[in-house]
Amino acid sequence: MARQARKGVALSSDLTSFSRDQLEEEVRRLRAQQRPATSPARLSTLDTLNAEDALLQVEARYRVLFEAIDDGFCIIEFIDGPHGPLSDYVHIEANSGYERHTGIANIIGKTLRQIEPDGAEDWLKLYGGVLSSGRPIRFEQHFIAVGRYIEVSAARMEPASLCQVSVLFRDITARREAEAALRVSESNARENVQRVQLALAAGAIIGTWIWDVPANRFAVDEAFAKAFGLDPELGRIGLSIEQVTQTVHPDDRGGLLAAMNAALRRGGPYAHQYRTRRADGKYYWLEANGRVELAPDGTALSFPGVLLDIEARRTAEDERDRATAALRALNETLEQRVAERTAELMRAEEQLRHSQKMEAVGQMTGGLAHDFNNLLAGISGSMELMQTRLAQGRISELERFVTGAQGAVKRAAGLTQRLLAFSRRQTLDPKPTILNRLVSDMQDLITRSVGPTIEVETALAGGLWTTFVDIGQLENALLNLCINARDAMPHGGKLTIETGNRWMDERAAQQRGLTPGQYVSLCVSDTGTGMSPEIVERAFDPFFTTKPTGQGTGLGLSMVHGFAGQSGGSVRIYSELGKGTMICIYLPRHLGEAEVDDDIVEVAAPRASGSETILVVDDEPLVRMVAVEILEELGYHILEADDGPSAMRILNSGQPIDLLVTDVGLPGGMNGRQLADAVRIRRPDLRVLFVTGYAENAVLNHGHLDHGMHVMTKPFLADAFARRVRELLTK
């Protein structure tokens, strides 16, 4: 370095006179000189010193040249990055002009994606084209990271294997802003010229003025003076601004003076609309357009301008405003009329829904009346005949009438069970169940029920989830669906029973009236006549049927619908006329193992084994009497109560009681479930049998009864009642 200081650096030309192209070429030439062609190991000592001295001179010349460039200058080298080969570049050299023109200091070593992540792809495309083609380019680009516009010249450094590009640039933001301002000014000028031309063409120019602000001399042309009844000579010499504003409408003077004073303070263009009194003494709308010229110290010098007649335009605008106001008022009244009409339609729709509801209620009550009248006729007729035969002493014929009456009672019980299922009020006894086992057990029964002309096929899913359901009610629902499918195929066809696991997302669940989650499906499909959309809409209505009178109650599908809803699921119909029907029951998945039911063997009603005591609680005297008679006939000791408080007094008396048989719906402010819960506080092991004809599932906890609690539905057979009592007492 001492050798370099003594010798100095001799430059062959004045750097400040270099053009941009010459500077770029000189930089490339000097940079090439930094790479000696001969290895230093092969040179003599003297040659080595000379070579080092020459290299130092070249580097010094290169650095002086580098810093002599007022423009920004840098050399970039393409590198591989996370986005792929040559997907980034690093700044390996830069002069002090780089910071002056970009504001970025210490650029050497920084990559493109570090300083310009948002615009990186644009720069890579430009410089990458230079690197691949070897053709220099010039362009202007917005440098997003620093908020400046720069003018760039770029060329590839040789050899190409270096993957380097030299970049010479300058900040042209001020120039771009000046050009933009010039364009705006030109646009405004063009608009002003157009306005003047339009005004001239329409004869809207009233006159011109020039206001000498320091002298307060307001000179106007002859047209201006004539329009306002002024002396033309006086107008040429000049008026004071106070004289001119005397023609302005009193209501507009304050706004005019405020606008003029604001224009005098800021300078530049001015436009204001106001009313003036013309030569005929009437006020008219006009627009003053002008421009305030300012001195270097900011004081106003002159204010030339032109007056335009805008009376016709303002009249049109006023008419437009009146029309808009009228239209707005019309819209407001229209909205009111639409709201009134909508309310009227809603009332009509509500009346229609009420009418349809009453029609459905009428249809249901009519169907109930029809079916129960038939059943009551059979029961009352059998009872009368029994009474007659007893009076005649012909007791040998009583069994036939008793059997007929019992049959009618069973049919009535089945009808009420279907109604309760539709209303979701039936008493359920749900258990963990696998539907595949239920379908397999019922296949023979279904095959016999649908007849030989219909082929029955099952498609049971592997790995089927468990569901929590009343097995008996589900069997009834499946049989109902299969019988409906049989009736839809009078000339034979194919019936398919399918099971499957279903994941219901929010959309699928909403379409089926469910909450999102996991479900098990049981579907029955047929190749029958199908249903129209209107029939599908009403298929679940109670007592609605398309079958001829006497061939269907119209409660089958309504029972299935109510049972599925009460079990936490839903049922849907998919049908098309002439192409068959598929009805699917969706039941929630149960996370537990299915229970295995032992085969039930019918035996005679068991008698009491000793001195068991049973408390019977029911508010219906006849039902209580029947239950007491059945149990006393079997040898049990019976206590009776007609409501909850009476039963509590007996239970609190200290008498030994082995079983509590109670109705669920009891009077006196305590239902059967509350009675059982209160008793179990003192007698936790007391067994309870709920006997009910209408059991609210909320009271019975939707079938989830405590240990030792069971439920039985009215009406019941004496033998079934006796077996259930014996079963509870022996557990």
Image (spheres, rainbow, N blue to C red):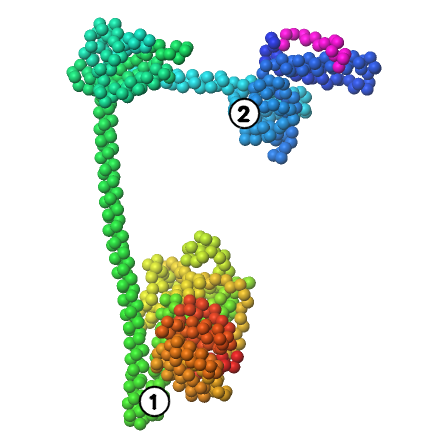
Give the residue type that dot 2 points to.
Val
- The answer to whether residue 625 is above or below residue 96 is below
Task: Name the side, left or right, on which 16 lies relative to 674.
Answer: right
Identify the mark nearer the N-term, 1 or 2. Answer: 2
Give the residue type that dot 1 points to.
Leu
Per the rendered image, the range of residues in magenta is 1-15
Q: Nearer the viewer, mark 1 or mark 2?
A: 2
Residue 125 quadrant: top right
Q: Magenta segment: does it hold 13?
A: yes
Residue 510 visible in rendering = yes
Q: Position of residue 528 (x, y in %)?
A: 39, 64
- Tell me the element at label 1: helix
Who is closer to the viewer here, 347 or 83?
347
Residue 551 quadrant: bottom left
Disc 1 to disc 2: CB gap under 8 Å:
no
Mark pair 1, 2: CA separation: 110 Å
Residue sitting farthest toward the left: 280
**Residue drawn at the location 32% of the way across and 12% of the way down:** 303
- Tell me the element at label 2: loop
The residue to which callout 2 is attached is 146
Q: Residues within 10 Å of mark 1 (few under 14, many from 20)?
A: some
Task: Name the side, left or right, on which 27 lies relative to 175.
Answer: right
- The answer to whether residue 217 is above or below residue 323 is above
Q: Which label was assigned to residue 573?
A: none
The residue to which callout 1 is attached is 398
Q: Magenta segment: does it hold 294?
A: no
Q: Position of residue 503 (x, y in %)?
A: 50, 57
Who is closer to the viewer here, 174 or 20?
174
Who is closer to the viewer here, 38 or 421?
421
